[in-house]
Amino acid sequence: MATAAPAAAHGVEPGRVVLGARDGWAAGTTGGAAAAPRDVRTVSKRSELAAALAARPGVPKIVYVRGTIEGNVDARDRPMSCDDFADPAYTLPAYLTQYDPATWGKTPVSGPLEEARARSQANQAAQVVLDVGPNTTVVGLRGAKLHGLTLRVTGDNVILRNLRFEDAHDCFPQWDPLDGADGNWNSEYDNLDLVGATHVWVDHNDFGDGDNTGSVEYFGRKYEVHDGLLDIVTGSDLVTVSWNRLHDHDKTMLIGSTDRPDADAGKLRVTVHHNEFTAIGQRAPRVRYGQVHVYNNLYRVPEVASYTYSLGVGVESRIYAEENFFRIPAALPLGALVKYWKGTVLHATGTLVATGHGRPRPVDLLAEYNAANDPDLGPDVGWTPTLVPHLDPAREVPARVTAGAGVSGRG
């Protein structure tokens, strides 16, 4: 394992970059910037990454990622397939036979075969989920990729930058007959999870499914092996998500995972700015409880069929959206850009929408939503963002975000 730090870019070593004093809810986050030389590591394998993240808990650390790190491997970094993770009592054909809704009905799945599926899933999780503790910076060097891995941030003061997160897939999705009118397949892993984490900066990353787009259906529903790209849940707080590309995926960014206020009330304060959401289905973001500032983001919707909504107004959410830019098909109703999830208010100003190949025009998202839906949402979210280093006019967002979002070539 190499331990030398990479060359500094513009005079600052990449792992020692910190978040500005006014840049969103996570302003001032330092991560591992104060790491001593012994706590700076460069890794290129899953086993090295796991060891680096676990070393000297709580001590400031910088972890540089080089090349592609594969998550679906054993302790010696040898590739593992879904069959290798499967419990001896589990097979997909047996699962499909057992829980066929034509015979099983609308009862939650249960019994020995479901228990074997859960054990199989736990076998995979033991390898592909890695915890990121406090005072840590993880930075990707040129071309760095985390494939099939979930980073789960559980600590305070964490920075994740310049990483390509790709295809965190679940080998063992669960059938839920009660999810929607016809049931659905649900999977377990996100590319990046913030779970009870605080002061976290997620910056200049790329999130997607890679080549694993999946088109198989069972029981008339897509056999969904992906969950979210970036979820912020379980009382996480003071987070800035900036200059990322999130693309070619359905469930994209969830802020608050339950309607129950157990851990989330008064928390989930998140800033989402200068991100590019392209060819995503929903949750950009979907919010419960939090005061969430959504500004200067670029939304590209290439076609209607796989799109559901962008801004999800959930229970007690307080979304303050401003100066965002949408490029959408002409057939997509403007009222569909927002979806009701038991919330009551939304601030949305300065929005520009370009339909088809047409010129952008100002759109009042709240008015469009209220005209098409009941109940109406109110405009007063009860707060005004102050941690904003610079607010771009929406007309400048496509050029700025297209040029600047995603991973950097430096490092």
Image (cartoon, rainbow, N blue to C red):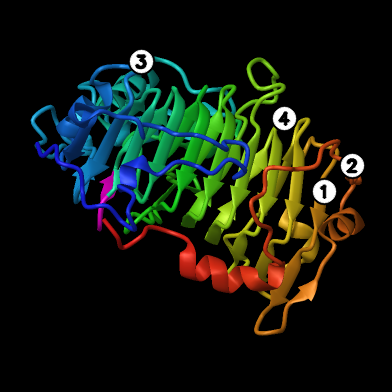
Q: Secondary structure at mark 3?
A: helix
2 or 1: tag closer to the N-terminus: 1
| Discs 2, 1 touching: Cβ within 8 Å | yes
Query: Closer to the camera, 127 or 105?
Result: 127
What distance separates the C-alpha of mark 1 from that of mark 4?
Answer: 14 Å
Q: CA distance from mark 3 to mark 4?
A: 37 Å
Q: Nearer the viewer, mark 2 or mark 4?
A: 2
Give the magenta part as a residue range: 141-147
Residue 125 position within the rendered picture, expressed as x and y whole percent measured from the top left: 31, 27
Mark 2 and mark 4 in contact? Answer it, CB < 8 Å.
Answer: no
- Rendered image: mark on residue 380: 2
Label 3, residues with CA under 10 Å away: few <14, some 14-19, many ≥20 = few
Q: Sequence-wise, which precedes: disc 2 or disc 4?
A: 4
**SS for dot 1:** strand
| Badge number at residue 289 | 4
**Quarter placement of the C terminus:** bottom left
Q: Position of residue 110 (x, y in %)?
A: 46, 18
- Residue type, label 2: Asp
The reply to whether dot 3 and dot 1 touch (C-beta < 8 Å) is no
Q: Is residue 240 visible?
A: yes
What residue is shown with label 3?
Answer: 112
